[in-house]
Image (tube, rainbow, N blue to C red):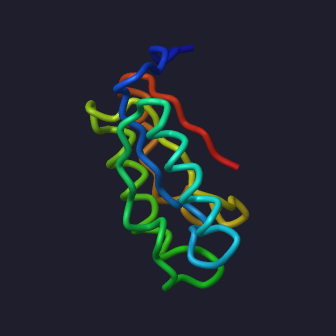
Amino acid sequence: MKFPKPLKKGSTVAVTAPSFGCTTEPYISRFKEAVRLLKEHGYNLVIGDTVFKNDGIGISTSPFVAAKELMDFYLDPKIDAVISAGGGELMCETISYVDFSSIKNASAKWFLGY
């Protein structure tokens, strides 16, 4: 098992929506508050386009697009952690497009989701 390095002030956290994003209330307000708190604690943030997309059916966007953004963030050496913006029921559609061999060979990274 690989363990990621601990996060510290200045670490970069990416937020993506591999399932449901933040396009309605109360999710928009909660997301803005989470962003404020993460920045207040000294983290750098990268907010993915999928977080605010609403062109999917029950999911933020197409599963292919969601998986690509998730993979891009996970494989980016400048990003220390990846957080799912919300939901998770339809991650089963996105997961089909995730390249697990690339993740296996990448450095360990924190991933938080629902």
Query: Looking at the image, which residue is at 49% across and 31% down?
Result: 41
**Residue 61 in the figure: left or right of residue 22:** left
Q: Quadrant of residue 112?
A: top right
**Residue 102 in the figure: left or right of residue 67:** left
Q: Position of residue 68 (x, y in %)?
A: 37, 58
How many marks the image carries: the answer is 0
Query: Looking at the image, which residue is at 65% across and 67% down?
Result: 27
Q: Quadrant of the N terminus?
A: top right
Of residues 107 and 85, the one drawn nearer to the viewer in this rendering? 85
Q: Position of residue 20 (x, y in %)?
A: 62, 68
Q: Position of residue 74 (x, y in %)?
A: 39, 40
Query: Looking at the image, which residue is at 42% across and 38% down?
Result: 13
Please determine whether, in this image, residue 95 is positioned above or below residue 79. below
**Residue 78 in the figure: left or right of residue 61:** left
**Residue 72 in the figure: left or right of residue 89:** left
Of residues 102 and 38, the one drawn nearer to the viewer in this rendering? 38
Of residues 42 and 62, the one drawn nearer to the viewer in this rendering? 42
Q: Quadrant of residue 93?
A: bottom right
Of residues 2 and 45, the one drawn nearer to the viewer in this rendering? 45
Please determine whether, in this image, residue 104 is positioned above or below residue 23. above
Q: Position of residue 49 (x, y in %)?
A: 37, 67
Query: Looking at the image, which residue is at 46% across and 51% down?
Result: 15
Please determine whether, in this image, residue 80 is positioned above or below residue 72. above
